[in-house]
Image (cartoon, helix red, strand yellow):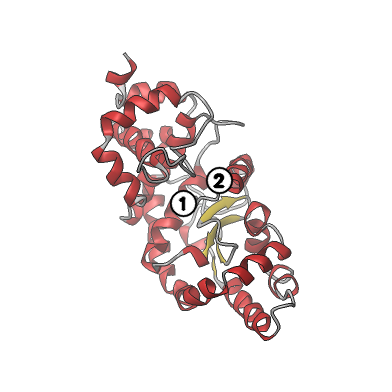
């Protein structure tokens, strides 16, 4: 969930984690079982080529959404939204789509690296489940998410395919996490995202969120003071999925601080296997924060 149309992302966020209670049933705990599905990318480009022949005709409904995989249907709510919405976005941004075409057609080259991250996670967390990974083309509003059908990656958002294993790893972690319930607080959501980055980096080598990490590391004191004042509320502005532009901060500082909290918790733990389980199945986020020790001096 690295991209940020605020309204759609926040709605989709709730729906995504709502299904996590059901998501893991029915999938194998063998990394070899996971399918990497890229056929929807080819379907999209066929529809796109037909659209270019007559830009008044919406080819994306019958030639892409109607015939797409479970990945397309899973990515449609709150992201693709509808054939009509996708048609409007493509008409408006057809040049942008054309620029990423070659990249999207190369994504299948990253399957081995993605599966390697699955093997790495299996070592860390033997009870992990490995769902299908669907690479689909959406409406330029989401780089990835997960749901009951599996993991969904928005191929048009991937300007650098070398980042694909890291994005897949992040979504794989989300698929394993226990959701805290409706209306998560800023603290809860930041730890969910940050811990996905933490384990995602551990298994893929990609930290992600470079701008947020750099800004966080150079404004730590100011940000920690601000975070403790907001963390128990549900206002994510300036921390997740968008900013008010009140200063020069980048998006998603919640990922950065959630990563730091998780990293400190893990570093303190003597039983690392138990720590991994605990991080993926947090029951009490305030207690988790306290045990991490990360914000101690700001909470006194």
What residue does disc 2 label? Answer: 6
Q: In the visual, does 220 lie left or right of 53?
A: left
Question: Which numbered dot is residue 2?
Answer: 1
Give how far across and how far down residue 62 sits, in percent: 75, 73
Q: Residues within 10 Å of mark 2 (few under 14, many from 20)?
A: some
- 293 is higher (above) or lower (below) than 124: above
Q: Is residue 123 visible?
A: yes
Q: Is residue 280 visible?
A: no
Quadrant of the image occupied by residue 193: top left
- 36 is higher (above) or lower (below) than 252: below
Give how far across and how far down residue 197 sits, in percent: 38, 46
Give how far across and how far down residue 85 sits, in percent: 69, 62
- What secondary structure is marked by label 2? helix
How far is mark 2 from mark 1, CA to CA?
A: 11 Å
Q: Residue at x 52, y 31 (%)?
A: 235
Q: Residue at x 60, y 62 (%)?
A: 139
- Out of 23 and 144, give the one closest to the viewer: 144
Give how far across and how far down residue 225 sits, in percent: 33, 25
- What secondary structure is marked by label 1? loop
Q: Nearer the viewer, mark 2 or mark 1?
A: 2
Q: Residues within 10 Å of mark 1 (few under 14, many from 20)?
A: many
Quadrant of the image occupied by residue 298: top left
Q: In the visual, does 94 lie left or right of 260?
A: right
């Amino acid at each position: 969930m690295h991209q940020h149309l605020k309204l759609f992302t926040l709605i989709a966020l709730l729906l995504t984690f709502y299904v996590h209670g059901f998501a893991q049933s029915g999938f194998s705990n063998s990394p070899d079982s996971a399918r990497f599905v890229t056929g929807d990318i080819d379907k999209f480009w066929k529809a796109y080529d037909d659209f270019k022949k007559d830009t008044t005709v919406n080819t994306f409904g019958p030639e892409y959404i109607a015939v797409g995989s479970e990945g397309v249907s899973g990515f449609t709510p709150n992201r693709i939204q509808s054939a009509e919405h996708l048609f409007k976005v493509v008409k408006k941004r057809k040049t942008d789509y054309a620029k990423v075409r070659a990249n999207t057609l190369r994504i299948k080259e990253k399957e081995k690296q993605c599966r390697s991250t699955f093997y790495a996670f299996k070592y860390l967390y033997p009870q992990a489940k490995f769902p299908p990974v669907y690479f689909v083309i959406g409406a330029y509003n989401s780089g990835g998410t997960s749901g009951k059908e599996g993991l969904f990656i928005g191929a048009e958002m991937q300007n650098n395919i070398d980042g694909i294993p890291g994005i897949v790893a992040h979504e794989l972690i989300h698929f394993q996490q226990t959701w805290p319930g409706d209306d998560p607080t800023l603290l809860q959501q930041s730890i969910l995202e940050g811990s996905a980055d933490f384990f995602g980096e551990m298994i893929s080598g990609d930290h992600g969120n470079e701008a947020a990490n750099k800004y966080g590391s150079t404004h730590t004191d100011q940000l920690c003071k601000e975070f403790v004042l907001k963390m128990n509320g549900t206002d994510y502005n300036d921390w997740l999925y968008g900013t008010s532009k009140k200063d020069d901060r980048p998006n998603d500082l919640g990922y950065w601080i959630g990563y730091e909290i998780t990293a400190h918790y893990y570093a303190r733990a003597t039983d690392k296997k138990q720590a991994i389980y605990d991080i993926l199945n947090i029951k009490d986020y305030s207690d988790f924060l306290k045990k991490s020790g990360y914000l101690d001096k700001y909470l006194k």
